[in-house]
């Protein structure tokens, strides 16, 4: 009887971990495509481009209203899409006049379906977006920066070393370590302890994705290889990526850097907590590093 109970417990634990790995690779809380530039009276062009491994990504290109050449590539979070990050980044074109390129990561929004790896495969998507600018809009590719939130900020942080041509990056609420963010997400949502279930979940995620190295794609392991200026932003009320975790990205950054903690800012919603402070700090940083390039 005891052996049977143990077997059931182990089988149940394995099933739970297998289910959890599926949640990681296929986010269960996908935001619908419900926010579009037309709702803000914005002029834009629908664009599409191919990744190095052959997937088609969907995007929007917003030309500078003042004819500026500087461009920001906008990177959304896990389970979100380009519409979800639209409103909080509009000031970058309305106030600052930058060109903006939005796109959906693979497996999100209007882009091709794919497993989500929170880094390894998404770096290919970022490369595809940058290649699109170089190939199709060369006049807007001379001075390019990144603006990312959550997973998008983490991917941006990892992508800087491979793209030294980038002039600046704004990183809001990036995770520092792949395992740590899974651990905290599992605890916050399901009160699942790291050992043994989360540890087993991450192992199964590697196996199910077919990529045994996905756990090595952690921003803190990449950011020190880049000299690109970064502004790292944390929210004091962020329970998923608290300031002490986000600060690890700032501390390891290898180039000019600044760190901003927004009082009362939740995960991916720092601008909502302090829009005037947020806009002023981000704008000043980009004017200094992107516009001066």
Image (tube, rainbow, N blue to C red):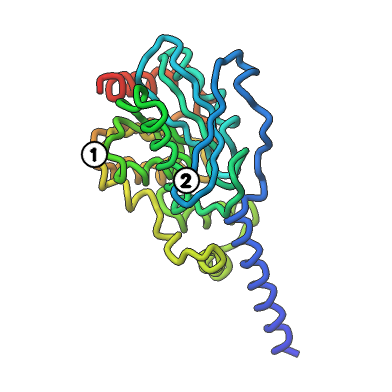
Please tell me which residue lies in front, 191 or 250: 250
The crowding category of the residue bearing disc 1, from other C-alpha atoms within 10 Å (few below 14, some 14 to 19, many at least 20), is some
Please tell me which residue lies in front, 25 or 232: 25
* Residue 143 place in picture, x, y as percent: 31, 26
Q: Is residue 138 left or right of residue 104?
A: left
The answer to whether residue 261 is visible is: no
* Secondary structure category for the residue under label 1: loop
- The disc at residue 51 is 2
Residue 82 vertical position relative to residue 96 in the rendered view, above or below: below
The quarter of the displayed image where residue 174 is located: top left
Residue at mark 1: 227
* Residue 130 place in picture, x, y as percent: 39, 36
The answer to whether residue 293 is visible is: yes
* Residue 90 place in picture, x, y as percent: 51, 20
Quadrant including the N terminus: bottom right
The residue positioned farthest toward the right in the image shown: 1
């Amino acid at each position: 009887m005891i052996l049977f109970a143990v077997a059931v417990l182990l089988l149940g634990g394995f099933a739970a971990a297998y289910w959890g790995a599926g949640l990681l690779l296929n986010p269960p809380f996908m935001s619908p495509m419900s926010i579009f530039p037309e709702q803000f009276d914005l002029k834009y062009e629908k664009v599409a481009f191919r990744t190095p491994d052959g997937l088609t990504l969907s995007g929007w290109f917003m030309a500078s209203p003042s004819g500026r050449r500087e461009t920001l590539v906008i990177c959304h979070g896990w389970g979100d899409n380009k519409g979800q990050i639209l409103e909080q980044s509009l000031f970058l074109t309305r106030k600052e006049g930058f060109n903006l390129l939005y796109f959906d990561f693979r497996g999100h929004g209007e882009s091709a379906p794919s497993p989500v790896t929170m880094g390894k495969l998404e770096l290919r998507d970022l490369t595809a977006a940058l290649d699109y600018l170089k190939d199709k809009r060369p006049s807007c590719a001379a001075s390019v920066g990144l603006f990312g939130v959550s997973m998008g900020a983490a991917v941006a942080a990892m992508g800087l070393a491979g793209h030294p041509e980038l002039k600046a990056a704004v990183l809001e609420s990036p995770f520092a370590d792949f395992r740590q963010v899974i651990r905290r997400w599992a605890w916050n949502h399901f009160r699942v302890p790291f050992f043994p279930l989360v540890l087993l979940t991450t192992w199964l995620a590697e196996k199910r994705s077919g990529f045994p190295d996905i756990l090595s794609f952690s921003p803190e392991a990449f950011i020190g290889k880049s000299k690109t200026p970064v502004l790292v932003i944390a929210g004091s009320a962020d329970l998923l990526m608290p300031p002490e975790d986000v600060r690890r990205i700032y501390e390891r950054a290898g180039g000019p850097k600044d760190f901003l903690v927004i009082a009362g800012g939740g995960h991916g919603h720092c601008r909502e907590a302090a829009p005037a402070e947020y806009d002023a700090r981000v704008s000043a940083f980009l004017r200094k590093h992107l516009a001066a390039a």
